[in-house]
Image: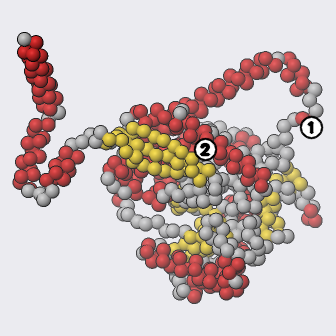
Amino acid sequence: MEDAKVQAMRAHQLHQLKKEAIVYYQSNGVPLKMEDALNQMFRDRPDCVFGYLSNYFEQLALPPVLSGVRCHKSFDARGWETLAAEVTCRHRNEDRVAGRSRASLQVTVGEHDKPEEREREAQELRHHVEAALTLVNEGPLKQFAEQGFDPRDQRAIDEFLLMQLQAEEDRVKAELQRELDEAGAASGAEGSGADENASPQHQPAAAAGGKAGGSAKKRGGGKGGKEIVIVPDEPREGLFPGCLALSCLSAACAAAGASAAGVPLYRHLRQQLLADESHKDCADKDWRLPLPMLTILSGGKASPGKSNCVKEYMIVPRPGLPFDRVLRDSVAVYQQVAKTLSVKGGPAARFTNDAGALNTVIDRPEAGFDLINDALKALELTDSFDLAANIAGHELFDYEKGKYDLAQGAQKSPDETADFLDDLSAKQASLVALIDPLRRVERDAWLRLCQKASQRCLIVGDATQHRPGRLLAELQQMEAEEAETEQPPAEEGTQQQQQQQQPLLTSAWVARLQQRNTVTELFDCAKRMRSSGQVVVVAVGPSDNGDTTIVDLA
């Protein structure tokens, strides 16, 4: 009797399961799709039956969604700490890593800087990387993966990341301000009395000879007796600790979107542009490979020679040449220069720096160009390549003397440096680009150089220009101010401050995906730069971190 009841109960449960299965499969259209798949397969009669079914049902699967994100610490070619990100997507009921990326902060110290400055920079990088790890793995950006974003919607992803990072930054600032207010209220009259009795030597010395901030200083002009006004660098942008997670996650999501779309990253990025109304003008442009600029010789203050005024001697292929030929010929030029150095000075003369550029003795700025020109002549490639020079003027400036240290015993004022670079470009007929010739704050000398040399070569802004996100905001602000025709003129001091905040007048702009930037901001800023007639150069950071997104962006 008991067995009969158990059997009846089991039969009832089985019947209920069958009814639920029928409802489940019918509500999802499984029987109709299965019948259609079998009918199509019978008509096509493929060799691989199950592969045919797999391809058929894969087209019906739900689109992939972001399901997880994880960051860890990494290192670049120079040993600086960087951030690496992995983005996971859920597709066909499985979570898989769909995109990876690495991001670095802009390193502001050079090889010639003091060890304590390099150590300070290393500590700052470590702090930013640790903060980014906390933001992504434990902080508010961890919620980013819970939103169920389609990895192919790059603009929506970047806007959400920016919003989350800005909200966290506002929260931290508000908390810090509250702590300062509480501390100020607790100190009360004791603090105010101490401030009144403080001697000048206890006051902050931010403007006393530092590289950034403060006001202009005047020094004697030496034999000429002309007073020199030293304009300090503009203060470094106060980046929120951990903000490099923004560019790292943005690039990783772009790679995940390409994986979800089943296309290479460069094709996915183009599809993102065409899908954006603000980039519809890209639809009529053909595919084209970028022109690779290759550094052959390394100079600057870190070089063993007397000349400091050129940090990098570069070759630039002329437009219209096949990419494979350009790559092959560029390597041939590099090897020819290395061979020439070995013949003249032995194996020690062809030492390279950590970027792979030949680091030899250069006593005159023309000597580096002569070495490359001789190699081009020997290879019969003078019609295939032009030259470019990275001056890195911000690294040449002597803040004590207020002059540019162009060579040992040869220091020049900003205007004299502009004239010197103009003469250098005039002597080198194949020189087509000067990168960062002066500091950003030397606007009069910069304009002087542009008026003289811009007809012969491009004046390129790299370190002298702000990051893409900030530069984009500056351009938008300029357009808004130009639209207000009835705006009253500002006072002289305010006009100078506004002028320093405006983008520099350049012929070309170097775009980098690092720091607090996103892929979308990079595209938007590049579009505005190109619409203003500028050439866009896409570059990696000061050191290679192993990320290849730069190739697809170019």
Q: Is residue 305 above or below residue 205?
A: below
Q: Quadrant of the N terminus?
A: top left
Residue drawn 12% across the image and 41% down it: 33
Where on the picture, by quarter, is residue 464?
bottom right
Please tell me which residue lies in front, 109 or 307: 109
Q: Who comes first in sequence, dot 2 or dot 1?
A: 2
Q: Residue 129 carries which label?
A: 2
Where on the picture, by quarter, is residue 305?
bottom right
* Left or right of 350 on screen, residue 168: left
The residue indicated by pointer 1 is 201
- Counting from the top left corner in percent of width and height, residue 376 is at 57, 83
Cα separation, mark 2 vs mark 1, equals 36 Å
* Left or right of 349 on screen, residue 19: left
Which circle, 2 or 1, is nearer the viewer? Answer: 2
Please tell me which residue lies in front, 440 or 200: 200
Residue drawn 82% across the image and 70% down it: 408
Label 1, secondary structure: give it: helix
Q: In this view, does 416 lie above or below 30?
A: below
Label 2, secondary structure: give it: helix
Q: Is residue 470 above or below residue 289?
A: above
- Counting from the top left corner in percent of width and height, residue 25 is at 14, 32
- Counting from the top left corner in percent of width and height, residue 183 is at 76, 21
* Left or right of 392 on screen, residue 168: left
What amino acid type is highlighted by mark number 1? Answer: Gln
Question: In this rendering, does residue 316 appear at all?
Answer: yes
Residue drawn 12% across the image and 23% down it: 14
- Counting from the top left corner in percent of width and height, residue 378 is at 57, 88
What amino acid type is highlighted by mark number 2? Answer: Val
* Left or right of 65 on screen, residue 404: right
Display coloring: secondary structure
Q: Which mark is residue 162?
A: none
Question: In this rendering, does residue 475 appear at all?
Answer: no
